[in-house]
Amino acid sequence: MANLKEIRIRIASVQSTQKITGAMKMVAAAKLRRAQMAILQLRPYSKKLSEIVGNIASEDTGNNPLAEVRPVENVVFILITSNKGLCGGFNNNILKHTEYLLSSEYASQHAKGHVHFICMGKRASDYVRNKKYPCIGNYDHLTENTSFDAIADIAVQLMNDYTAKKYDKVIIVYNEFKNAATQILTHEQYLPIRPAAQPDNVKTKVDYIFDPDKKELYNALIPKVMKVQLFKCLLDSVASEHGARMTAMHKATENATELIKQLNLTYNKLRQAAITNEIIEIVSGAEALNG
């Protein structure tokens, strides 16, 4: 009977966990809907803005300091993770990929202590603090309350630092949102600016009439493009986080349901065996008395 009591307690515990994971799944699904709408609405604007800048930059527009390529001595990593866990490999993938980059492509800079970090998300902040890496900014609140103005301030500071040659390269490591079940681990170069690649299906470029001239317009649009690009990465990461958490909680709920079925089956078998043993004991006792 002690075994039966233990199984009843375990069934109740798993049922409680099932309710929690089911509720977390619904909350993540509601947050995902809003985050997905935000990133899907921003992408066309970001893409068109980049196309316009690419068209302007296709001809000689003067040397913009943000496009200056120089030997890489000092690097900044922008890590975008979540503040909370229970979202599968969402955060671990970012941190493992960062370690890979530090041990391969940026090994020499990392050995000299010339790799600095900007963290968006508590998991990234904890990682950098535990590793004792140089951190030049923590913005954990931005993953919960996305703000374009706050992102714009960070982008402006990075552009000023790059122009002042404080840093030679800026890399963003984040999860790009594809759908609720799929997040694409991505690292992309933020600075210096790379020329936009023209799509293969575009054979002729659009001949715009510019006022003011191309150079002035190009230099005015670049800061706006950089702000939008960083904001897009943040929105991608937020949507990916909710998608990963919803998927993880869905799997956890399914696993809990399956475990409850197995425990109920085991409980019924043990209960049936106990009842059978009691009947045998009663019958044996009766026969002994009659004998």
Image: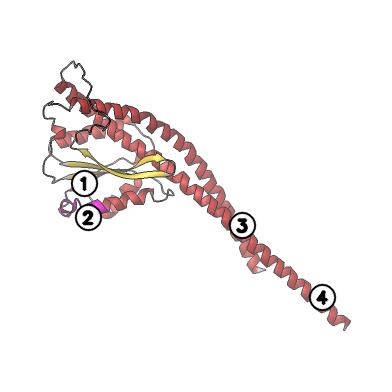
Question: On the image, which quarter does residue 156 sit in?
Answer: top left
Between 49 and 114, the residue placed more toward the observer is 49
* Sooner in the amino-acid sequence: mark 2 or mark 4: 2
Secondary structure of the residue carrying numbered label 3: helix
* Sooner in the amino-acid sequence: mark 4 or mark 1: 1
- Tell me the CA gap for discs 1 and 3: 51 Å
Question: On the image, which quarter does residue 225 sit in?
Answer: top left
Residue 283's label in the rendered image is 4
Residue 103's label in the rendered image is 2
Mark 2 crowd level (few <14, some 14–19, many ≥20, 10 Å Cα): some
Secondary structure of the residue carrying numbered label 2: helix
* Sooner in the amino-acid sequence: mark 3 or mark 4: 3
- Residue span colored magenta: 99-119
Between 229 and 126, the residue placed more toward the observer is 229
* Residue 195 higher or lower than 21, as above or below: above
- Tell me the CA gap for discs 3 and 2: 47 Å
Residue 261's label in the rendered image is 3
- Tell me the CA gap for discs 2 and 4: 75 Å
Q: Which residue does the numbered mark 1 point to in the structure image?
A: 116
Mark 3 crowd level (few <14, some 14–19, many ≥20, 10 Å Cα): few
Q: Residue at x 46, y 49 (%)?
A: 248
Q: Residue at x 36, y 34 (%)?
A: 146
